Image (tube, grey):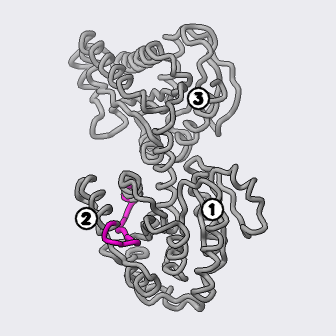
C-alpha cells in the first residue's frame, strides 16, 4: 500500500484522496476502519480514513487516531499521512503525536501547511489565507474550532509533547545536501516535528524530494498537496529499487502552444521523466547541423533512459523565449516558412525512429500535434492505426499498422486538447497498455 491518510473529517479525507487519484494513485475513502475488510484494504494503492475527530476532546482524538493507525500494524505501508485542516483547526498536535507514538521513535512528522491552489501559503512560520494572516480571517469566529494564531509552531508547541523545529523559505534556498544534513541533525537532536514554509507546488515537490533523500522515516502532515507529492516521490523510490521494467514509452512533442507547455510542466512535476530539449534552430541551418542535432538528442535520451519508463523529446519552441524566428531563417536560407516547418516535423520523426530502433524496450509512443503524428506515420511507412480506445476527448489510443514499427502502441493528442493534467492521464494510460503487453 502506498499511502494511508488519516483525516479528522470526511470532506478532508475525500479532498486528499482526490489529489492522490490525480497523480495516478486510486484512493478508497473509509468512514469506519474498524468495520472495513482489512484484507480488501491491503489490495488498495491508497486509502483515506475519516476519524471525525476535529471537534472532540484532545485525548479522545489522540486515542482514535492511534487506534486507527494500529489497524495497519500487520501491513506494509510506504507513507502514513495526517491530513489536517487547511486553516489549522482541530487537534492537529495531539493527532500528529498519536501517529508518531504508533510508528516509533525514529519517525518524524514533516508538517507542510500549504495548499497553493486554495491560496494557502506558509511564510516565515505563518499561515496566510489569500495573503492574509490566518488569525485575521473568519476562522477566529469558528463556533467549534476557532484559531487565534497564524503561527503554526505555536499551535504545535501548545498541543504536542515533542520538540518542534521550523525550516523557512530562506532555508530552502540552500543546496539539497545541506538541507538533508539539517533534517538528519534535527532527528539526532530528538526533534520529532519539522514545520516547513512553502508557497508553491514546486516547493511542495522539492520538500517531498528532500524528505525522501534524507532516508528519515516520516509522516506527511498537511491539507493534502504535500501528501500527494510525497506519495509520488515515495513511489519513485520504490520503482528505483525494483528491477527496471522492460517497457518504456517515448513522448515526441512538437507543439508550440501554451496549453502543451502547461501540460508538460505538470507532467514533469508529478512523474519521473527523462526529458531532452531539441534545439529547433539547429534543424534548419543546413544538413550537417541537422544531422548533428538529431544525433545529439537521440543519444542524450538513450543515455539516460535506463532509469526511466517515461522519456520525452520536445522542441524548444514550446518555450516562448526559445522560439525560432522562422521568417528570419526563411530569408537567410531561401526556404519558405512552410518548408522549414516540414523540416522540423520530419526531423522529430527521424529522432523518434532513431530512439525506437535503438532500444527495443520502447513499446509505446505518444505524439503531440497533428503534423508530428503525420510525419511519424509517413517515415515509419505505416498505413495507419487500428483504433482501440478514446483516452479522453480528442485523444485516441491505437496500434500502428504495417511499416517499420508495426504493432507499436500509440496515443495521439492535439496540442490544444485537454486541461493541464491531460498529458499525465495519457502517460498513465499508455504505460498501463504497455504493461499489458509485458
Q: Which residue is mark 1?
A: 73
If you read the primary sequence from the N terminus, does the residue marked by circle 3 or circle 1 appear first?
1
Say whether residue 223 is visible. yes
Mark 2 is surrounded, within 10 Å at the Cα level, by few (under 14), some (14 to 19) or many (20 or more) other residues, namely some
* Nearer to the camera, 250 or 384: 250
Q: Residue 190 magenta-drawn?
A: yes
Q: Is residue 32 left or right of residue 109?
A: right
User: Which residue is found at the position 78% from the left and 67% from the top?
Assistant: 35
- Quarter of image, res 47: bottom right
Stretch in magenta: 188-203
Q: Where the C terminus falls, by quadrant?
A: top right
* Nearer to the camera, 169 or 178: 178
Compute the Cα span from label 3 to label 1: 42 Å
Which x, y percent locates residue 88? 49, 79
3 vs 1, front mark: 1
Mark 3 is surrounded, within 10 Å at the Cα level, by few (under 14), some (14 to 19) or many (20 or more) other residues, namely many
3 vs 2, front mark: 2
User: Which residue is found at the position 45% from the left and 65% from the top?
Assistant: 107
Mark 3 touches mark 2? (CB < 8 Å): no
Q: Is residue 317 left or right of residue 429?
A: left
Q: Which residue is mark 3?
A: 411
Numbered disc 2: secondary structure: helix
Q: Which residue is mark 2?
A: 171
Q: Residue 147 magenta-drawn?
A: no
1 vs 2, front mark: 1
Amino acid at each position: 500500500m502506498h499511502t494511508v491518510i488519516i483525516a479528522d473529517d470526511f470532506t478532508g479525507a475525500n479532498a486528499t484522496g482526490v489529489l492522490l487519484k490525480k497523480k495516478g494513485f486510486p484512493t478508497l475513502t473509509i468512514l469506519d476502519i474498524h468495520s472495513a475488510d482489512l484484507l480488501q484494504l491491503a489490495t488498495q494503492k491508497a486509502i483515506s480514513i475519516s476519524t471525525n475527530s476535529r471537534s472532540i476532546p484532545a485525548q479522545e482524538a489522540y486515542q482514535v487516531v492511534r487506534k486507527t493507525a494500529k489497524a495497519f500494524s500487520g501491513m506494509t505501508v510506504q507513507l502514513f499521512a495526517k491530513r489536517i485542516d487547511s486553516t489549522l483547526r482541530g487537534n492537529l498536535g495531539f493527532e500528529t503525536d498519536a501517529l508518531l507514538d504508533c510508528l516509533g521513535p525514529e519517525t518524524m512528522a514533516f508538517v507542510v501547511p500549504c495548499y497553493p491552489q486554495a491560496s494557502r501559503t506558509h511564510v516565515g512560520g505563518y499561515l496566510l489565507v489569500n495573503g492574509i494572516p490566518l488569525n485575521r480571517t473568519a476562522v477566529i469566529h469558528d463556533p467549534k474550532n476557532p484559531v487565534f494564531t497564524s503561527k503554526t509552531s505555536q499551535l504545535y508547541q501548545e498541543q504536542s509533547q515533542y520538540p518542534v523545529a521550523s525550516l523557512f523559505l530562506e532555508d530552502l534556498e540552500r543546496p539539497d545536501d545541506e538541507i538533508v544534513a539539517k533534517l538528519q541533525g534535527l532527528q539526532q537532536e530528538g526533534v520529532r516535528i519539522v514545520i516547513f514554509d512553502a508557497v508553491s507546488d514546486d516547493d511542495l515537490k522539492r520538500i517531498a524530494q528532500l524528505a525522501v533523500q534524507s532516508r528519515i522515516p516520516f509522516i506527511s502532515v498537511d491539507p493534502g498537496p504535500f501528501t500527494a507529492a510525497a506519495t509520488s516521490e515515495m513511489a519513485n523510490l520504490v520503482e528505483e529499487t525494483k528491477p527496471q521494467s522492460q517497457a518504456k514509452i517515448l513522448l515526441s512533442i512538437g507543439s508550440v502552444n501554451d496549453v502543451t507547455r502547461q501540460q508538460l510542466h505538470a507532467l514533469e512535476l508529478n512523474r519521473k521523466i527523462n526529458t531532452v530539449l531539441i534545439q529547433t534552430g539547429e534543424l534548419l541551418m543546413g544538413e550537417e547541423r541537422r544531422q548533428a542535432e538529431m544525433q545529439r538528442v537521440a543519444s542524450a535520451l538513450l543515455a539516460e533512459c535506463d532509469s526511466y519508463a517515461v522519456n520525452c523529446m520536445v522542441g524548444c519552441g514550446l518555450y516562448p523565449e526559445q522560439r525560432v524566428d522562422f521568417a528570419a531563417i526563411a530569408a537567410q536560407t531561401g526556404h519558405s516558412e512552410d518548408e522549414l516547418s516540414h523540416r522540423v516535423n520530419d526531423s522529430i520523426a527521424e529522432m523518434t525512429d532513431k530512439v525506437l530502433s535503438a532500444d527495443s524496450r520502447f513499446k509505446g509512443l505518444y505524439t503531440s500535434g497533428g503534423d508530428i503524428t503525420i510525419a511519424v506515420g509517413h517515415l515509419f511507412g505505416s498505413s495507419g492505426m487500428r483504433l482501440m480506445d478514446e483516452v479522453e476527448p480528442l485523444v485516441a489510443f491505437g496500434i500502428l499498422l504495417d511499416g517499420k514499427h508495426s504493432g507499436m502502441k500509440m496515443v495521439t493528442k492535439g496540442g490544444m486538447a485537454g486541461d493541464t493534467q491531460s498529458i499525465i492521464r495519457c502517460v498513465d494510460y499508455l504505460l498501463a497498455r504497455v504493461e499489458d503487453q509485458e
